[in-house]
Image: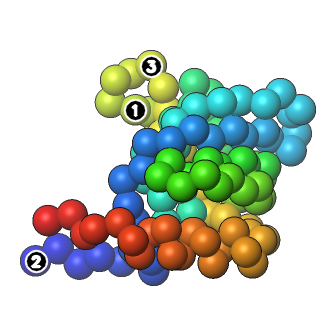
Amino acid sequence: MIVNKRRHRRIREYTSISYRLFSNPKLEHFLTRDLSESGVRFLSYDFITKDTLLELTLNLKKIPFSFQTQAVVKWARKDPTGERYEVGAEFLNIPKKAHQILVKYIAAIPEEV
């Protein structure tokens, strides 16, 4: 039996994300892998260390809505393809309206079997 330790439901979401490290003004653009109301997993060409603060802009795929928030990197690992890294980040200070829309958006996606 697999026990899910996640606080919130996670959905597969392949959509655009822009991020900037607080220590580097360069804006990077990539794709998300999955999304929850508390965080996001995305791809990056650069390894980003744990506890790095990010500024994110996330575009929701199925509705015309994007939001900006801060996030902290919780983990990073080499992507199986070998060319990129997967990064898991937890949202910080997500705007209230964005959080409400995100919760409804995730709830509207059917559960995967």
**Badge 3 amino acid:** Glu
The answer to whether marks 1 and 3 mark residues whose Cβ atoms lie closer than 8 Å is yes
Residue 108 position within the rendered picture, expressed as x and y whole percent measured from the top left: 39, 71
Residue 37 position within the rendered picture, expressed as x and y whole percent measured from the top left: 54, 71
The residue drawn where x is 57% and y is 69% is: 102
Residue 83 position within the rendered picture, expressed as x and y whole percent measured from the top left: 45, 19
Q: Which residue is mark 2?
A: 1
The answer to whether marks 1 and 2 mark residues whose Cβ atoms lie closer than 8 Å is no
Residue 96 position within the rendered picture, expressed as x and y whole percent measured from the top left: 75, 78
| Residue at far top of view | 83
The answer to whether 31 appears left or right of 111 in the picture is right
Rendered view: 92 above or below 55: below
Q: Which residue is mark 3?
A: 83
Q: Quadrant of the C terminus?
A: bottom left
Distance, label 3 to label 2, CA atoms, is 33 Å
The answer to whether 19 appears left or right of 83 in the picture is right
Q: Nearer the viewer, residue 112 or 1?
A: 112
Q: Which residue is mark 1?
A: 79
Q: Which mark is residue 112?
A: none
Mark 1 element type: loop
Mark 3 element type: loop
The answer to whether 85 appears left or right of 23 in the picture is left
